[in-house]
Image (cartoon, helix red, strand yellow):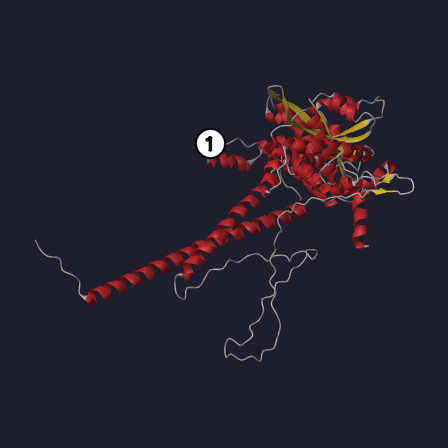
């Protein structure tokens, strides 16, 4: 058996040096790889950011060019979010790797320029004092030549507090009677929640789609244990207090000459099952034709989609109704209607969807890429969509102009396009089977052609019913969070709160701040002056108080 030979000291030193050099090479390789990966991630994030900016600019300048526009923006924003997070993570890894290598340059991302923080935010100065002696020579004869200020945005966690309202009692020595100031107003009788807390609960439940049980969990983690029944009691009472404001909002909406109408489903918890209720909306928005009236949205709840509900909602109203072809609206268009005629105006966006599905080249390409059978593309449907898009471009250019100006441009530019589109559909419709999807899309328009051409005879009419669809968008998002309404009464409460919150948003007002101020003041406010508390009037008064 051979004895092992120990390495000589010189060999050991050489081995250590080689090992150290190898470690340095590995560290340098890792740092270089991390830098390359960070640079690649940064490039991808920058590309995603620029794509999103381009799409947003296109959306602002030209409006929606297809049904996929809003969805595309959502996808780009989500993609940007992921790529930005990945790029920042890779940057941090690259900097950590660079610190392990001597003289290795650290990677720093090229970030888009950030807007300065709003001026209204309070500033807290934290001064890092300059040295008392020169670090280079030790001299003490220093003179100040300026300063550099770095601003960091910070948030103070939500603070809870209990307000103790003390009412002193006094006794009269002459008459021996006891007197005391009256108790302050509480939104809820013998209530314990202040208006700010009530507004937060209402807005998070109906505006942010956070059910009360989730709010209870969060409050508990913040050290404020509250029961679900306690919060529900406050929400119900606050909704009752705000009901008169909802009536005034309804009066404003129903004073419009033109309304957007639509509805959507809302699951409702029933005995041992979930039924399907409906949330209806009627939106007044005169801004497209330069009307001075502030925009507002009115919501109603019903346990089903029977036609009696819109007839009840619009029982005393007459004017132009922009809506889809739901059969429940049909009796509203009767010429001999007692309350006055309601004129139907069709939604071109709704009609366009059926053609767009048959002409969606990108969707067909995606199916082919996924190994699925691609959907057939209809050249005729594609041509119809392209012709409709020219109408949408004209509408985007005249948005905000007066009704007569819009009508003049429509008769000059849009009318020939509409006539050509009708002729095209009438030419090809006889050759299609009535079961064909393209034929069904054509019939949807041709059978209601007077409603779809209404915009050529009245400058107030919009080409689409998108205003109502936007108002319902929050409910569609909320369905995924709260799953169902607890009852029909809960649906009615939700309709009241949706009306108030969506209207505030339409007027660019913070719904929570507005609700808090309204709840704090509504008891002392004269009922005949309740219109002063409507969002647009409140905003004007609030601005006066703010600048005073």
Q: In terms of image quadrants, where is residue 277?
A: top right
Q: Which residue is mark 1?
A: 372
Residue 467 appears at what percent x and percent y? Answer: 71, 37
The structure residue drawn at horizontal position 20% and vertical position 65%, both measured from the top left corner, is 11
Q: Residue at x 71, y 22 (%)?
A: 327
User: Is residue 388 or residue 179 the one in the foreground?
Assistant: 179
Give whichever of 505, 466 is nearer the camera. Answer: 505
Work out whether residue 207 can be spotted: yes
Q: Quadrant of residue 432?
A: top right
Q: Position of residue 314 (x, y in %)?
A: 79, 27
Q: Is residue 25 above or below residue 466?
A: below
Residue 394 in view of the camera: no
Query: In the shown orientation, is residue 463 left or right of residue 155?
Result: right
| Count of marks overlaid on the render | 1
User: Residue 479, image x and y in percent?
Assistant: 62, 31
Which residue is at the far left? 1
Residue sitting at 81 percent across and 51 percent down?
Answer: 545
Hey, which quadrant is residue 75 in on the image? top right
Q: Position of residue 90 (x, y in %)?
A: 46, 53
Circle 1: is it few (<14), some (14-19), or many (20+) Cα within 10 Å?
A: few
The residue lying furthest to the top in this view is 271
Q: Left or right of 35: which side holds 131?
A: right
Q: Nearer the viewer, residue 102 or 204?
A: 204
Q: Quadrant of the C terminus?
A: bottom right
144 or 470, which is in the foreground? 144
């Amino acid at each position: 058996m051979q004895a092992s030979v120990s390495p000589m000291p010189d060999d050991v030193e050489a081995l250590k040096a080689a090992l150290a050099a190898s470690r340095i090479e590995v560290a340098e390789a890792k740092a270089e790889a991390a830098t390359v990966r960070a640079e690649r991630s940064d490039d991808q994030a920058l590309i995603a950011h620029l794509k999103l900016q381009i799409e947003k600019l296109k959306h602002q300048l030209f409006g929606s060019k297809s049904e996929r526009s809003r969805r595309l923006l959502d996808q780009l924003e989500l993609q940007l979010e992921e790529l930005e997070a990945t790029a920042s993570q890779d940057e941090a890894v690259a900097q950590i790797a660079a610190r392990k290598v001597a003289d290795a340059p650290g990677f720093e991302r090229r970030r888009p320029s950030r807007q300065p923080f709003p001026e209204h935010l309070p500033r807290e100065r934290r001064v890092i004092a300059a040295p008392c002696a020169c670090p280079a020579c030790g001299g003490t004869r220093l003179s100040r030549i300026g300063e550099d200020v770095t601003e960091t945005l910070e948030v103070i966690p939500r603070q809870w507090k209990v307000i103790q309202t003390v009412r002193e009692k006094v006794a009269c020595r002459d008459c021996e009677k006891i007197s005391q100031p009256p108790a302050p107003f509480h939104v809820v009788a013998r209530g314990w929640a202040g208006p700010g807390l009530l507004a937060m609960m209402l807005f998070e439940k109906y505006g942010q789609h956070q059910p009360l049980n989730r709010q209870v969990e969060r409050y508990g983690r913040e050290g404020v244990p509250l029961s679900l029944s306690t919060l529900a009691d406050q929400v119900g009472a606050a909704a009752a207090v705000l009901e008169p404001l909802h009536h005034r909002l309804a009066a404003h909406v129903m004073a419009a000459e033109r309304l957007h109408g639509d509805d959507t489903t809302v699951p409702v918890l029933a005995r041992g099952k979930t039924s399907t209720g409906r949330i209806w909306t009627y939106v007044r928005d005169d801004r497209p034709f330069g009307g001075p009236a502030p925009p507002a949205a009115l919501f109603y709840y019903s346990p089903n989609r029977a036609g009696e509900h819109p007839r009840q909602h619009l029982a005393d109203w007459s004017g132009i109704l922009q809506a889809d072809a739901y059969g429940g609206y049909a009796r509203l268009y009767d010429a001999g209607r007692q309350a006055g005629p309601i004129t139907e105006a069709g939604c071109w966006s709704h009609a366009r969807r059926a053609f767009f599905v048959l002409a969606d080249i990108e969707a067909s390409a995606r199916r082919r890429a996924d190994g699925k059978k691609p959907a057939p593309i209809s050249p005729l449907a594609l041509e119809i969509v392209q012709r409709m898009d020219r109408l949408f471009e004209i509408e985007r250019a005249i948005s905000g102009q007066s009704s007569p100006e819009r009508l003049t441009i429509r008769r000059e530019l849009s009318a020939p396009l509409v006539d050509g589109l009708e002729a095209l559909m009438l030419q090809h419709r006889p050759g299609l089977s009535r079961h064909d999807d393209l034929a069904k899309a054509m019939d949807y328009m041709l059978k209601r052609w007077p409603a779809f051409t209404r915009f050529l005879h009245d400058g107030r009419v919009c080409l689409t019913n998108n205003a109502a669809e936007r108002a319902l968008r929050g409910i569609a998002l909320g369905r995924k969070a709260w799953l169902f309404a607890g009852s029909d009464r809960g649906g009615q409460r939700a309709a009241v709160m949706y009306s108030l919150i969506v209207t505030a948003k339409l007027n660019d007002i913070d719904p929570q701040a507005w609700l808090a101020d309204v709840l704090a003041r509504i008891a002392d406010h004269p009922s005949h002056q309740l219109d002063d508390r409507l969002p647009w009037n409140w905003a004007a008064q609030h601005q006066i108080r703010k600048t005073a």
